[in-house]
Amino acid sequence: MKLGLSEIDYRSLFDNMIDGLAYCKMIFDADGLPADFIYITVNENFEKLTGLKEAEGKKVTELIPGIRASNSELFEIYGKVSLTGKPEKFETYVQPLGRWFSISVYSPKKNFFVAVFQNITDRKEIEKDLESAKTAARNVLKDLEIEKKKIAETSAKEEAILAGIADGCIAVNEKGEIILINQTAQKMLGYTQEESIGKLWHEILHREDESGNPISPEKGAIRAALSTTTTTTTTTTTTTSSFYLRKDRTKFPISRTVSPIILEGKVIGAVNIFRDITREKEIDREKSEFVSLASHQLRTPLTGIEWTIELFSKKEKLTEEGRKYLDYIHYSAVRLSNLIKLLLNVSRIESSSMSVVSKPLDLVELINENMREHQALCDRGKISFIFSKHPQKLIATTDKNLIGYIIQNLVSNAINYTPTGGKVEMLLEEKKDSLQFRVQDTGIGIPKKEQEHIFKKFARASNASIVKPDGTGLGLYIASEAAKLLGGKIWFESDEGKGSTFFVQLPLMSPDRAGNKELVLEPK
Amino acid sequence: MSVQKIVLVEDDEVLSKVMYTELTDAGFEVSQAFDGEAGLELIRSKRPDLVLLDLIMPKKGGFEVLGELKKDPSTKDIPVILLTLLGEDEDIKKGLRLGANDYLVKSSHAVAEIIEKIKTFFSKESHPEGDQPKI
């Protein structure tokens, strides 16, 4: 059977196909290389797909200027196909047209070729977008991996630090469940990480006071930290003696610091850092034993000297010369005695075992008492000593010995360093939650450049050493240490040659270190 | 009035001698012991009107001596004044709790003051508060 298709039938087929079609003649140059091609005939969709009008009879280089440069492969492939007759299929981007084409090409006879093509620009765009999306996703993944690695490194570092510190560290979440216990804490308490994580802190941390009574977790610093309502961090340091029980029920003395963990104003947990202070307590005990022994051993023969002098001067008939020598001995003995007393005070103050025993007392009365003790010294130097401004009564809960050291040292300094005929004035006033007193003198003052060192141990101003060569340089040191122990401060204003004013500010309620209270440090 | 008897228990030789001299001069009859054990023995044999008792001593400390005196019905009524060196609060409280009548601080008092205090102590003893003075 023979199919009879007319030329018109072919033409209609040709024009109605979806693909573009071009029948072309290849042009070769003198060297036989493909140089150009002429469109002999094209179908209707050719114009739609390429945007090229009236192409028939024209060279491609006329129709699409720049095509040789942008698509040299087109010439090579068409040339090869029209010579060899072997069909090819390929995709290409024609830059001057800004379009992608999928092209299949074959050769019906030598030097001629037919290109059937589709515009695949939209598909290519989608492919390109997809590729960009893939790249973006890959980049995000890469970033995530870097972040993950960073976090892993940071947490490894933190874990190493926590493991490395010599203090025990336990962190709890807002419910009080243990979320972290470092190796030191595990070793000190005898619990493993597995036994601790997820437990409530007081299932692991059992605290006792000095007499062996359990301390309720409700009264402790961790509960306080978790109940923190302010947005500022308040760190609680336990200064009183307390003990942690190990898993085997043996115990050890601790010092600890508990801080709430606050995130965006909300308490999300607490950190408890603690230390075994067995050795410190031992050293403290040895030190205070040594001090009391040494002072006892020194004071006994000294008292013997003083009493013998007393007896000697009473019982013996002495020449004037002899009495003078005895006075020298007596003077030296008194100085030695004072020095021992001061050193003992320094030692007591420096030893952390020094208990601050706070009881209510009337400051006005205490100062009056002190003034009476110094009256003789003032009379000798013709110094007027007045308690010029003070309330009728000022009751403060404080340690009598410590506040006594402060008043005693400031007053005796003021008198000792004020020239004959001068004036020493004492003022006392109550402020909000605190008391302030001032000791003002018309003395020699402290030279400007020596002022910053004046509270240091054994520090003496150069002019003070001239006026009173036998001073110890301990008085102001003791006064400032005592003020610190009471939770207060001491400062001064001084003009060399005109006088000094020392200010002392103390809380009306001093911390009691003998009781079982916890000292709350200033908010960070 | 008969001569009042005092037993002085003090281990430091110089302090003891000075006090002995001054107390004797003041008219008291004084016996000395230089450690706690000897002191206890002396008190038991002498039955003094007053014991002056140092705290830190060899063989037996002052607190131990005080405790034993107060435990023994035959010596528990003998008044005891403690001789402290530095006047530590802790020591004083402990001594008074154990039954001492009073205390003296050696390092902050002149001998004369101490003798004066002992005299005052005896005058109070002979005229306890509430008693009508005898005619």
Image (spheres, rainbow, N blue to C red):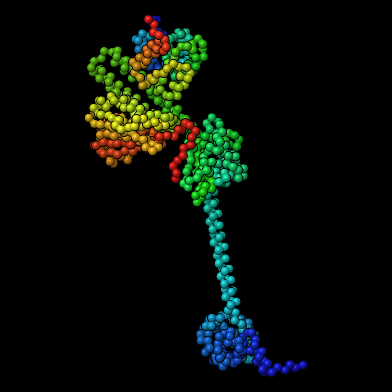
Camera-nearest residue between B67 and A46: A46
In this picture, residue A331 sits left or right of residue B32: left
- Look at 41% across and 20% down and name the residue there: B84
Q: Is residue A225 left or right of residue A306?
A: right
- Residue at image coords 44%, 19%: B55
Residue sitting nearer the eye, A50 or A147: A50
Q: Residue at x 45, y 22 (%)?
A: B93
Q: Position of residue A71 (x, y in %)?
A: 54, 83
Q: Is residue A184 above or below residue A69?
A: above
Looking at the image, is A51 positioned above or below residue A318? Answer: below
- Which image quadrant is residue A93 in? bottom right
Q: Position of residue A56 (x, y in %)?
A: 57, 92
Q: Position of residue A167 (x, y in %)?
A: 51, 41
What x and y, as percent, mark residue A28? 56, 90
Query: On screen, A154 above or below A46?
Result: above
Identify the residue at horizontal 58%, vertical 68% (top origin).
A134
Instruction: Identify which residue, A125 or A275, lies in the foreground.
Output: A125
- Residue reaching furthest right? A1
Quarter of the image that includes the N terminus of chain A:
bottom right
Residue A438, compared with residue A83, is above or below; it is above
Residue A460: quarter of image:
top left
Instruction: Tell me the quarter of the image containing the C terminus of chain A.
Output: top left
Does residue A190 appear anywhere in the picture?
Answer: yes
Q: Can residue A193 be seen in the rendering of this structure?
A: no
